[in-house]
Image (cartoon, rainbow, N blue to C red):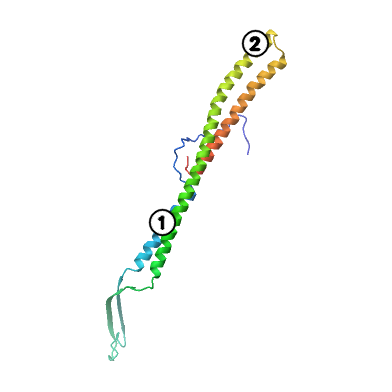
Amino acid sequence: MTFAGDDSFLLPEPVITGEETIDNPDIRLFDVRKRQLGATMNLLKSQRMPKAFGFAQAGYGLPPGNNFFSEVPDPYYSVGVGIKWTIFDWNKTSNERKSVTLQQQLLDINRSATEESLQRVLTVKMAEIEALREAGRRDAELIMIRQKIAAVSASQLQNGTITASEYLTELNGEKQAIISAAVRKINIARAEVEYINITGINK
């Protein structure tokens, strides 16, 4: 990869308010699993319901159908309906439903614990972001002060009241303040991206 001389890097600028809802993949996985357990519960309920069915059969042969006394081939058909109902299953379905219910309860507990854990991490990360933002606001003030000091030092150097070494010290102080502010902006952007990654929200 090559870069032109006028290329510049742009920092991401996600809008972080601290009120974002958690849509983390881990939370979505809990929701998928809960839907699966819900479908399993519905299936278990349907297994105990009576099931009606119908059937039809047609053919041609000798003997025709169930008429074993006929000696000539003939077409035949039969239709019917039936019902199937498992009344006793020795508590198998009941035990399976209890098992699914326990799994759902455990899933809810684990989901809640995961959400609380993520929320604590987000609280810490948001505090870090706020601290960096406040330091960034102070950086702007410090740069202005350093620029004024460097400008005064440049005037003093021209008038011969300070040495070149003293002027360079003040000029370096200004440059260092600018570099520190740039590093702070990078750290703010990094912390904000980490915050967004924890929430799972696409911004």
Q: Which mark is drawn over residue 128?
A: none
Lateral position of residue 44 relative to residue 76, left or right? right
Give the quadrant of residue 77.
bottom left
In percent of the image, x 70 and y 16: which residue is there?
A: 166
Q: Where is residue 17 in the image (x, y as percent from the top left)?
A: 46, 35
Q: Is mark 2 on a helix, strand or loop?
A: helix
Residue 94 in sight: yes
Q: Position of residue 136 (x, y in %)?
A: 55, 28
In percent of the image, x 44 and y 59: which residue is there?
A: 103
The earlier-in-sequence mark between 1 and 2 is: 1
In percent of the image, x 40 and y 70: which residue is there?
A: 92
Closer mark to the observer between disc 1 and disc 2 = 1
Q: Position of residue 153 (x, y in %)?
A: 65, 13
Q: Position of residue 118 (x, y in %)?
A: 50, 45
Lateral position of residue 40 relative to residue 57, left or right? right
93, above or below 121, in the image? below
Would you name the residue on which mark 1 appears? 35
Q: What residue type is labelled 2?
A: Ser
Give the class, few, some or many, for how many residues have Cα within 10 Å of label 2's Cα (few <14, many ≥20). some
Would you name the residue on which mark 2 appears? 155
Give the quadrant of residue 76.
bottom left
Q: What element carries label 1?
A: helix
